Image (tube, rainbow, N blue to C red):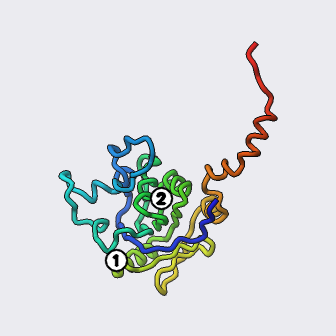
Amino acid sequence: MSQIKSVTGKAVPLRGDDIDTDRIIPARFMKCLTFDGLGEFAFYDVKFEADGSEKEHILNREEYKGHEILLTNRNFGCGSSREHAPWALYGMGIRGIVAESYAEIFAGNCNNLGIAAVILPHEEGEALIALSEENPALEVTLDLEKQEVRAGDKIFKSTQPDTYRKALIDGQWDTTSILLDSLDRIKELHRELPRFTRS
């Protein structure tokens, strides 16, 4: 299991409140058997016209492509609780998010993928977004242990639900890995369980 104590990368600023899961991954792209490949459809309708041509949008700007940290505003990930939304973000390379607030189920789904979703108050979040807009090459660190977001010489105090933060730091966020690591004990318990037969 992988411990995630900090996440460092270049940031892409995506301004806007109430960016919902349908904007993150439109429903028509969710007809899939696995989550593989969802990254190419992340934010599709804000990035592309109906004919497939690119819109003028910050996510299409070359200097922000491939960045690992997403900066946004209030109530990010609201709307449908579709698990596809954080998978689409993960597929486009996002490993950390900084927002003023999140939809609760969305934040939990991010944590289950190892995406650190931290919170900054409004003014600090706006200041961080402005720094990233001024300098697309700006490197941002989400320090989960110190509960800080660092960018250049700026340090912002961040928060995160303790259960999410602890799961990432302790490496307990990946429930599949936890099950696999406990497979011998699971088999042992299975053998110990009483058997019920139909009469």
Which one is earlier in the sequence, the residue at label 1 or at label 2? 2
Give yes or no for contact between labels 1 and 2 (Cβ–Cβ under 8 Å). Answer: no
Q: Hey, what amino acid is under mark 1?
A: Glu
Q: Is residue 61 left or right of residue 2?
A: left
Task: Name the residue located 56 percent from the left edge and 68 percent from the top edge.
Answer: 159
Q: Hey, what amino acid is under mark 2?
A: Tyr
Which quadrant holds the N terminus? Answer: bottom right
Q: Is residue 168 left or right of residue 96?
A: right
Which quadrant holds the C terminus? Answer: top right
Q: Position of residue 42 (x, y in %)?
A: 36, 56
Secondary structure under tag 2 reads loop
Q: Is residue 90 left or right of residue 40?
A: right
Of badges 1 and 2, the one in the foreground is 1
What is the number of callouts on the image?
A: 2
Nearer to us in this view, 126 or 136: 136
Task: Name the residue located 63 percent from the left edge and 65 percent from the top edge.
Answer: 3
Task: Name the residue located 42 percent from the left edge and 57 percent from the top edge.
Answer: 91
Q: Quadrant of residue 191?
A: top right
**Residue picked out by circle 1:** 133
**Residue picked out by circle 2:** 102
